[in-house]
């Protein structure tokens, strides 16, 4: 679990699992922007997987939340980035 969230920045949570290319891509995009996030690996954790499904309504990973707002998966986040809307949500330039 990556717990690099700093005070004063949006809280970002990403649910992931091992051997997930989209999870790796999401982490790479966030790190390229210098964004701190909490990663919750649901691979062998049924309780956390249920939590993810309840919060997101989806069963696939990754599932990404910014300040408790469900962003969606990697494709959704990448689309926000392409439309120049992700930085505003993240509080970056």
Image (cartoon, grey):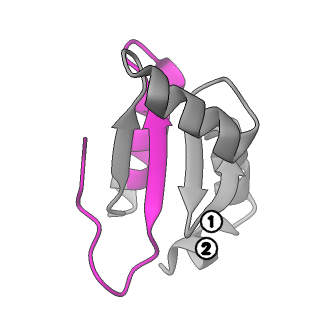
- From the viewer's perspective, tell me whether residue 13 is left or right of residue 87: left
Q: Residue at x 57, y 55 (%)?
A: 65
**Quadrant in which the N terminus appears:** top left
Magenta extent: 1-30
Q: Nearer the viewer, residue 47 or 79?
A: 47
- Of the numbered discs in the image, which one, if any, rests on residue 40? none
Write down the residue under mark 2. Answer: 89
Circle 1: element type: helix
Query: Residue 73 placed where, x, y %?
Result: 65, 38
Q: Is residue 27 above or below residue 41?
A: below
Q: Residue at x 47, y 78 (%)?
A: 92
Q: CA distance from mark 1 to mark 2?
A: 5 Å
Q: Is residue 60 above or below residue 85?
A: above
Q: Is residue 70 above or below residue 50?
A: below
Write down the residue under mark 1. Answer: 86
Query: Residue 88 placed where, x, y %?
Result: 61, 78
Circle 2: element type: helix
- From the viewer's perspective, tell me whether residue 47 is left or right of residue 54: left
Q: Residue at x 75, y 62 (%)?
A: 83
Q: Residues within 10 Å of mark 2 (few under 14, many from 20)?
A: some
Query: Residue 2 placed where, x, y %?
Result: 24, 47
Q: Nearer the viewer, residue 5 or 87?
A: 5
View extreme (bottom): residue = 8
């Amino acid at each position: 679990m990556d717990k690099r969230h700093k005070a004063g920045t949006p809280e970002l949570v990403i649910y992931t699992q091992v051997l997930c290319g989209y999870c790796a891509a999401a982490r790479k995009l966030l790190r390229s922007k210098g964004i701190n996030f909490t990663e919750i690996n649901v691979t062998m954790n049924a309780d956390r997987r249920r939590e993810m499904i309840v919060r997101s309504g989806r069963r696939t990973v990754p599932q990404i939340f910014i300040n408790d707002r469900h962003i969606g998966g990697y494709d959704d986040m990448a689309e926000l980035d392409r439309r120049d809307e992700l930085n505003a949500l993240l509080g970056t330039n």
